[in-house]
Amino acid sequence: INPAITGIENYTDIKAGYRNQWTGLAGAPVTMYFTAHTPLGNKFIQGDPMSQPANGEDPMSRSYVQDYQAAPAHHGLGFSVVSDKAGPITQSNYNISYAYHLGLSSNLNLSVGVAAGLASINLNTSQITLENSLDPAIANGNTNQFKPDLGLGIWAYSAQYFVGISAQQVLPQTLYFSSNSTYNQSKTVPHYFATAGVKLFLAEDVTLLPSVMFKYVKPVPSTFDLNLKMAFQDKFWIGGSYRRNDAFAAMAGINVGSFFNLGYAYDFTTSNLNTVSNGTHEIILGIMLNLVILLLPVKFYADKRSIVLQFFP
């Protein structure tokens, strides 16, 4: 949602997810995604309240917050592949993301990020039953299109709180499913997000993480998510979420050492679709690699300087 978090950790973060929405309803949305991002620069202490345990640290402990120091200025680089299928339409987004992180004070960071790539929109006409088989709205039209995709974001964070704003599909695009321009009314529109959260301590190694996310997509009414997560040391967490006029969700996750984590969420539909939906399932698999790409200046030839990549296991 926000490219500014690219490289926010002090490890390489890889995630894969699958979301099956409104199970039992034919043509309901299905989302699959894969993301990976890594910091570029000097090693530093990870610093976002949602961080996972890595390198022997427990970001859910009170002592971690007390000892926290803002990360030095560094870059982040990542990429993502997201596929959304709803009925006969499948949209796939392929993006490369970049972020720059800057320490504003001893315990506060600010990052700005951009994600750019391509969006593929496919209309499977074989899944559409028409009253008129020669309907000019889709007859002889393009069923697969590629459009430029751009996302922007800004993120302020410390070890105890975060706040950010972002936009996706910044470049509106017209979709052509027919060779007749009269029917070319489909368009992509920007999506806007605002997010904030804080870490509260119940004990040394037990924390509450309340957060909120607002979403605005014109002309759809704005909506929001209210989330609450309780984490126990660096072992596991449970939580819940409420999405306005849509669903309640129950969530849980487990961290296996400093390498692997697994999360699951189930949404209880509260909208009018609850009579035909059996809920929504989402599963997320995460891998954390103790890998930082260092940007080191080296001298060569006539005192010219170059940038090299050095990998540390």
Image (spheres, rainbow, N blue to C red):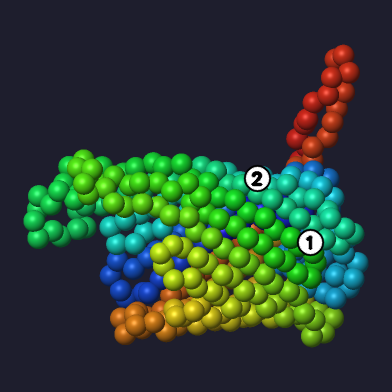
- Secondary structure category for the residue under label 2: strand
- Is 146 in front, or is 254? 146
Which residue position holds label 2?
98
Question: In the picture, residue 306 is in which quadrant?
Answer: top right
Q: Residue at x 31, y 56 (%)?
A: 89
Q: Residue at x 50, y 82 (%)?
A: 248
Q: Residue at x 50, y 59 (%)?
A: 191
Question: In the picture, residue 110 is in which quadrant?
Answer: bottom right
- Is 178 in front, or is 205? 178
Q: Is residue 244 above or below residue 213?
A: below
Mark 1 Cα shell of 10 Å, populated few (<14), some (14-19), many (≥20): many
* Amino acid carrying mark 1 in the image: Gly
In this rendering, position of residue 89 left or right of residue 301: left
- Residue 72, percent across and down? 85, 50
In this rendering, position of residue 162 left or right of residue 18: right
Report if residue 141 is visible in the image: no
- Is 273 in front, or is 257? 273
Give residue 47's mark.
1
- Secondary structure category for the residue under label 1: loop
Report if residue 241 is visible in the image: yes
Mark 2 Cα shell of 10 Å, populated few (<14), some (14-19), many (≥20): many
* Amino acid carrying mark 2 in the image: Tyr
- Residue 7, percent across and down? 71, 51
